Image (cartoon, rainbow, N blue to C red):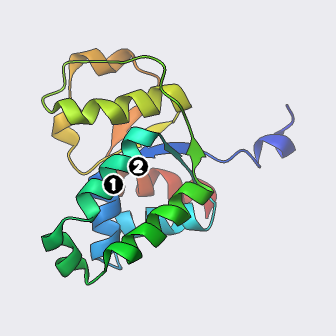
Amino acid sequence: MTAYMLSFIIMIVTIDTNVILAALLRKKGASHQILRLIIEEKLKMAVTTAILLEYDSVFKRKKLLEKLELTANDIEDILDLLVLIADKYSIYFRMRPNLFDENDNLFIECAFTSNSRYLITSNIKDFKRAELISYPFKVVTPAEFYRLWRPHHE
């Protein structure tokens, strides 16, 4: 592959629910910038059915809808957009690296299956396990990711 061809390869990342939520709550900050990069298709987001169901379940909580000042239909529109532009993956196996929160394993499975370079989460401590060292992706916060991404892509 030539350097010219490599310049058009878009990085794939897996995004934890808390990052999308932070992006929707605040119009500034790294989480919002990452969501902007995904919408502008400068960054590819990997999703699975389980992740989309997690997003849907969390974002449609009554207290969150009030805090976001959005309706359930608004959330549907946001999720529809993410589904439209994201790379979709099916999980055919379960990975259980002994994370503290069993629900976080769905992000590990997606990152592994999609060959994501990064799993982006605000709850980095939840993903700090020795078992993850051998995985082919790096777990980073939104701020860490944006600091890594920006000098090479903007």
**Percent of width and height locating residue 149:** 51, 53
* Quarter of the figure with the N terminus: top right
User: Which residue is located at x 29 percent, y 77 percent?
Assistant: 26
Whether label 1 touches label 2, CB < 8 Å: yes
Please state if 94 lies on the left or on the right of 128 as rendered. right
Which residue position is annotated with label 1?
55
Please state if 124 lies on the left or on the right of 133 as rendered. left
User: Which residue is located at x 27 percent, y 55 percent?
Assistant: 57
**Percent of width and height locating residue 124:** 22, 42
Asked if one can make out residue 137 in the rendered structure from this viewpoint, the answer is: no
Give the residue type that dot 2 points to.
Leu
Please state if 134 lies on the left or on the right of 37 as rendered. left
Which residue position is annotated with label 2?
52
Q: Is the residue marked by circle 2 packed among few (<14), some (14-19), or many (20+) residues within 10 Å?
A: some
* Residue at disc 2, secondary structure: helix
Give the residue type that dot 1 points to.
Tyr
User: Residue 129's quadrant in the figure?
Assistant: top left
User: Residue 99's quadrant in the figure?
Assistant: top left
Q: In the orientation shown, which residue stands out farthest toward the front?
A: 73
How far apart marks 1 and 2 lie (CA) works out to 5 Å
